[in-house]
Amino acid sequence: MTKYVINGGKPLFGELEVSGAKNAAVAIIPAALLVDGQCRIENIPRISDVTMLLGILRQMGAKVNVVNKSAVEIDCSNINGTQATFDDMRRIRASYYLLGALLGRYGKASIAMPGGCNFGGVRPIDQHIKGFAAMGASVGIKNGIVSAETAGRASGATIYFDIVSVGATINIILSSVLAQGRTVIENAAKEPHIVDLASFLNSMGADVRGAGTNIIKINGVRRLAGGSYSIIPDQIEAGTYMAAAAGTGGSVAVKNVIPKHLASISGKLREMGVEVFEGDDAVVVTREAPLRRTNVITLPYPGFPTDMQPQLSAVLCLAKGTSVVTEGVWDNRFKYVGELAKMGGNIQVGGRTAIIEGVAALTGAPLKSCDLRAGAALVIAGLCAGGVTEIEGVEYIERGYEDIVGKLRGLGADIRSIYAPDRSEFSMRTVG
């Protein structure tokens, strides 16, 4: 069992480099199935979700060559089937992108129902199925396996999503780039990683237009050729370190970012009394004054991201006054609140809303992460708190953050990743 041990209460100072975007990488890697030949993907984050997806492609017969710590070459010319029902599929949410990619390339696909974080009940794939069906696919779910099949190539269609869905937008893009005719996605999600996926596909020969707006048009092509592409920086990783600097009262330069992608995060931090200076590819976050309360509503991009809600809520525990956080994307994303309460946080949750009464200080405590971004919030809380915080369930955190321990240590944080064989024998071994 691995856990993080944090001796908190120390401001963070220095600079760090943000890794490639997790949410872009986990869409672009399955998209390699659509490419006829080898593609090279650079600025890949070294996280467990990426490792699992590359392993799944290997199990399917793809050639995967890890060139260096941030680049990989993938050739899916000789995969051994259109089924992906491995155990690893159930451990990662983004594995469902293999459904759209396989359907788009081969006209049929069967995948195990995906797993990953479950912070708001079962996340449905009804909008994905609606889109596939509009393109002529028959779709069924049996014994935890989702199957889809078309008679020949998928057919272009106009698809209107009932709700804005990042996953469905990505899956329909994947299924339509090799389809016959034009596909139009209305009420599409606009997130930066959707734009990045479209840019990757276009660099390989696809014709995807309008990504980043609510209407995306895809003109099907006969084939995608190989090429090289570099993934955008991770918006949420950057925002997490920005929140950590704000919470601890330090000054951190977060480099290798696209400041425009961080606009909603920077805006909220400024409302809280934090200074945020923007450069061409960096932001500097500094806090000297006490934190102020604010209200937050999570919304699809360009609104405040749901994936930053837990991290900002952890910081708001220390803001003077009453803050209101409304989750506008998922039904329930407040499972971490009980862990913050162990540290002295004062949060009351009702439905999709959390009322946070700021406290003078947080105190270190034994904690357990329940999902990826909740885990990041607990790390921030531990960095801000007095005393020692121990966090279990760090495998969730490592799904989306490359070397979080090393990066925080580089900013002066007292954080260690330790290995304990079991609860009765707390024999510690430093692993990061």
Image (cartoon, rainbow, N blue to C red):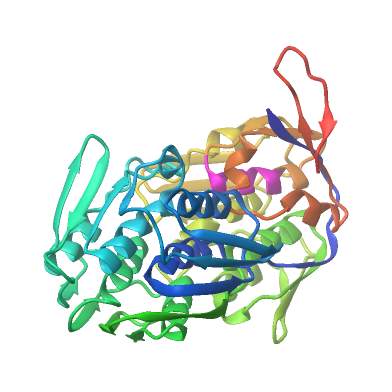
Residue 302 visible within the image: no
- Where is residue 15 drawn, in percent x and y? 82, 68
Residue 207: quarter of image: bottom left
Residue 243 visible within the image: yes
Q: Identify which residue, 126 or 162, lies in the foreground.
A: 126
Residue 285 lies, with reference to residue 244, above or below; the image says below
Q: What main secondary structure does the magenta stretch of the protein show? A: helix
- Where is residue 123 drawn, in percent x and y? 32, 47
Q: Identify which residue, 81 or 219, lies in the foreground.
A: 81
Residue at left 52%, top 81%? Answer: 227
- Where is residue 9 drawn, in percent x and y? 83, 45
Magenta-colored stretch includes residue 404: no
Residue 229: quarter of image: bottom right
Left or right: 327 in relation to 1 = left
Residue 332 lies, with reference to residue 17, above or below; the image says above
Residue 12: quarter of image: bottom right
Read off the magenta span: 371-381
Q: Identify which residue, 163 or 425, lies in the foreground.
A: 425
Left or right: 419 in relation to 20 = right
Magenta-colored stretch includes residue 376: yes
